[in-house]
Amino acid sequence: MSWIDFTGKIVVVTGGSGGIGRAMLDAFKALGATVVALDYRAEEAEAAAHAVGGYGFGCDVSDLRSVEAAADHIAKLGGADVLVNNAGILRPGPLEDLAIEDWQAMLKVNLDGCFLTAQSFGQQMISKGAGALVHVASISASQPQPFSGAYSPGKAGVAMLSRALAYEWGPKGVRSNVVSPGLVLTPMSEPFYANLEVKAARERRVPTGRIGTAQDMANTAVFLASARASYINGQEIVVDGGLSQT
Ligand code: NAD
C-alpha cells in the first residue's frame, strides 16, 4: 500500500474537466480512488472521467437542483468520501468598470457553488461519520491581485466557509481545508500567458522561478484529503512558490 491510499473511496471533483480538475482526477485515481468529475460542461466531464476510468456528470455547482441531481447519482455509487471544490470562474477587470452581472456570476459559482456542493456531499460524509473537503481558493483570498477585485471576495468567502465547516463538522468526522494556488498555467489563465514577455515577467516574480502546475495543486489536495492529514482541519495551504512572500 502507498503512503497515501484512497482505495475504496469516492472522490468528487467539481470543475473536473478544467486544468486543475483533471490533475485532481489523475492524482486521486493514481492513489486508488473511484473518481467522479462534475462540470457544467457535461460532455467534457464525462470525457475527463472516462479518461481515468471514473464517472462524469453534468452539474452546475451554482444551481441547487443540479447539485442535488449529482448527489443522487453519487449516493448510488456509495456516497462521497472526499469533495474537491474546484469549479471556478474568473472575470477579471478593474472594479470601477465591473458590471454587476460579472460580480454576481463570480460569487454565484465560486462561493455559492462551494456552499451547495459542501452541503450536499457533506451530508453523505456526515452520514458515514467520515470525510474530507478540500476547497480550491486562491492567493487572491488574502492578497489583492491585479484585476481580481471582484474575484477575491468570493475566494475569501470560500476560505472562511471552509473554516466554518471545519468547526461545525469536525465533531462529525468531516474535515475541511483549503488549497490556495498562486499562478497556475491552465485554460483559465492561458490568455494571460499567451504573451511570452508577460509570462516571463510573472515567472520572475515567483521566488521558485516558475509558474505553478495543476499537478502542484493536486499533490497538496491529495495530502489534505488523506488519512495522513487527519489532524489538519480548518487550514489553508498556499501553493504559490513563495509568490505571496514577495
Ligand atoms: P479552468 O477554467 O481550467 O477550470 C475551471 C472548471 O470549472 C472548468 O472545467 C469549468 O467548466 C468549470 N466550471 C465553471 N463554472 C462551473 C459551474 N457553474 N459548475 C460546474 N463547473 C463549472 O480553471 P482552473 O485554473 O483549473 O481553475 C480551477 C480552480 O482553481 C478555480 O476555482 C480557480 O478559481 C482556482 N485558481 C486557479 C488559478 C490559476 O492560475 N489557474 C489560480 C488561483 C485559483
Image (spheres, rainbow, N blue to C red):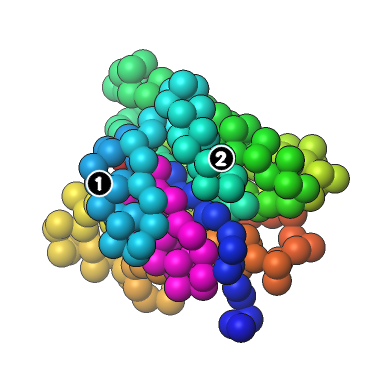
Q: Position of residue 237 (x, y in %)?
A: 60, 60
**Pick the front one: 246 or 15:** 15
* Residue type for callout 2: Ala
Q: Which residue is mark 2?
A: 75
* Residue at point 46%, 29% (across, down): 69
Q: Quadrant of ligand 1?
A: top left
Q: Mark 1, mark 2: which one is toward the viewer?
A: 2
* Residue at point 51%, 72% (across, down): 31
> Label 2 neighbourhood size at 10 Å, few (<14), some (14-19), many (20+)?
few
Q: Which mark is residue 44?
A: 1
33 to 37, vertically: above or below = below
Q: Is residue 113 left or right of residue 122?
A: left
Of the two numbered discs 1 and 2 on the same chain, state the one appearing first in sequence.
Answer: 1
Q: Is residue 52 left or right of residue 220?
A: left
Q: Residue furthest right?
A: 171
Magenta stretch: includes residue 44: no
Q: Position of residue 73 (x, y in %)?
A: 47, 38
Q: Which mark is residue 176?
A: none
Q: Is residue 124 left or right of residue 60?
A: right
Write down the region rendered in magenta. 17-38
* Residue at point 37%, 24% (across, down): 105
Q: Is residue 111 visible?
A: no
The CB of the residue at mark 1 lies under 8 Å from ligand 1: yes
Asked if disc 1 and disc 2 are in contact, CB closer than 8 Å, the reply is no
56 to 186, vertically: above or below = above
* Residue type for callout 1: Glu
Q: Position of residue 3 (x, y in %)?
A: 63, 81
Q: Residue furthest front?
A: 76
